[in-house]
Amino acid sequence: MRILVVEDEPSLLRSLAKALREAGYAVDTADAGDEGLYKAETYDYDAVVLDVMLPGLDGWQVLERLRRRKRTPVLMLTARDATRDRVRGLDTGADDYLVKPFDLAELLARLRALIRRAAGQASPQITVRDIVLDPRARSVTRAGVPVTLTAREYAIFEYLLVHRGEVVTRSALYEHLFDETDDTLSNLVDVHVFSLRKKLGSELIVTRRGQGYCIET
Ligand code: CA
């Protein structure tokens, strides 16, 4: 999953990006509204964390313009607990908001919920056949037995599972799993899928020639 963080306070931006990467997300950053809007319109993020108080376009303007074109889930960071801010955020098309200062664990939980809702999924856990993925623990079990996946394998498997029943192209995987700082591993998706099949069963992830991968439901 790939997240965009738009925040002009350098230390907060850095610590958010670091925490999100540690939680397994690919992370892009922007420290001004126009840059954030440009990236949010250009790339297909799984969620955007958007500060309200920004130089140039503020968070509301970014959100309003983004919503003319895209439904990307947006979590607003508001400076104070003002009812007017909350109402405005929800009216403008924000999916959720957090009041600064916030707890990092809560931000991560809300992002997981946003991404889950955007995929039309009610339960936090995803179950296919005898395999269960739990995004909270970033764990996978097969027939009740824990399966150890690398961070990259987990990210690919989670994305395919969230989009189960759909064909996921390789370019979609690259776009959602690699951030703007990541210029390595360009050809390794196939290798990770090979490894996933060894760990999870050869028939789970189906290759659709010339199109991509699919987990059938
Ligand atoms: Ca700010």
Image: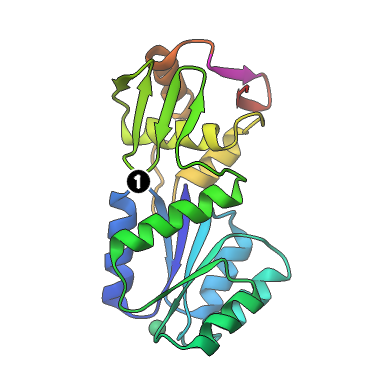
Above or below, comparing residue 33 to residue 134 in the picture? below
Q: Amino acid at mark 1?
A: Gly
Pointer 1 residue: 24
Label 1 crowding class (10 Å Cα cut-off): few <14, some 14-19, many 20+?
some
Q: Give me the residue at 42% from left, 16% from top.
A: 200
Image spot of residue 158 (x, y percent): 46, 35
Residue extent of the magenta highlight? 204-208
Instruction: Identify the residue at horizontal 39%, vertical 80% (top origin).
Output: 8
Q: Report if residue 34 is visible in the image.
A: yes
Q: Quadrant of ligand 1?
A: bottom left
Residue 25 higher or lower than 160, as above or below:
below
Q: Residue at x 68, y 70 (%)?
A: 67
Q: Is residue 102 above or below residue 133?
A: below
The secondary structure that dominates the magenta segment is strand
Left or right of 54 in this view: 93: right
Assess whether residue 13 is covered by the magenta stretch.
Answer: no
Coordinates of residue 36 in the picture (x, y in percent) = 52, 72
Q: Nearer the viewer, residue 168 or 137?
A: 137
